[in-house]
């Protein structure tokens, strides 16, 4: 998926970006300039296998795991 910066984003939580910010399901991360945003994106959001190291992505994965476990528990009781 591409955005403002035409980066190929690998993080499944990415929604869109602008010159100095990344928007994802977890919120909006602002950077002091476009280079800082690009460096962060390439380190965490746009490289296979590294997006899971982002603290926002990790928190969202934990949330969805917890939600799925809770949902499965309800069906097991039925």
Image: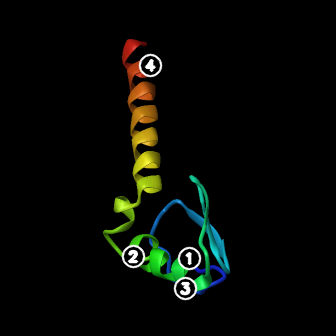
Q: Which residue is depicted at the point 59% across and 87% down?
A: 6
Instruction: Work out which residue is located at the far front of the displayed protein and give it.
Output: 32
Q: Nearer the viewer, mark 4 or mark 3?
A: 3
Seen from the viewer's position, the closer of residues 5 and 34 is: 34
Q: How many residues crowd around disc 4 within 10 Å: few (fewer than 14), some, or many (20 or more)? A: few
Q: Position of residue 31 (x, y in %)?
A: 59, 72
Report the disc number at residue 43: 2
Q: Position of residue 66 (x, y in %)?
A: 41, 33
Examine the image and state in which quarter residue 20 appears: bottom right
The residue at which mark 3 appears reads as: 35
Rounded to the nearest angstrom, the CA distance separating label 1 from label 4 is 35 Å
The residue at which mark 1 appears reads as: 1
Q: Nearer the viewer, mark 1 or mark 3?
A: 3
Q: Which residue is depicted at the point 39% across and 76% down?
A: 43
Position of the N terminus by quadrant: bottom right
Q: Which residue is depicted at the point 45% across and 72% down?
A: 10
Rounded to the nearest angstrom, the CA distance separating label 1 from label 3 is 20 Å
Q: Would residue 20 be found to the left or right of residue 70 on screen? A: right
Q: Are marks 1 and 3 in contact (CB under 8 Å)?
A: no
Seen from the viewer's position, the closer of residues 50 and 34 is: 34
Report the disc number at residue 47: none
Examine the image and state in which quarter residue 52 appears: bottom left
Q: Would residue 76 be found to the left or right of residue 11 on screen? A: left
Rounded to the nearest angstrom, the CA distance separating label 2 from label 3 is 12 Å
The residue at which mark 4 appears reads as: 74
Rounded to the nearest angstrom, the CA distance separating label 2 from label 4 is 38 Å
Whether 11 is drawn above or below 19: the answer is above
| SS for dot 2 | helix
| SS for dot 3 | helix
Rounded to the nearest angstrom, the CA distance separating label 1 from label 2 is 16 Å
């Amino acid at each position: 998926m591409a955005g403002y910066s035409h980066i190929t984003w690998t993080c499944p939580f990415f929604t869109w970006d602008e010159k100095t910010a990344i928007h994802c399901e977890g919120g909006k991360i602002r950077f002091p300039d476009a280079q800082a945003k690009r460096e962060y994106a390439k380190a965490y959001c746009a490289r296979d296998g590294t997006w899971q190291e982002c603290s926002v992505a990790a928190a969202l994965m934990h949330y969805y795991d917890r939600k799925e476990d809770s949902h499965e528990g309800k069906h097991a009781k039925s």
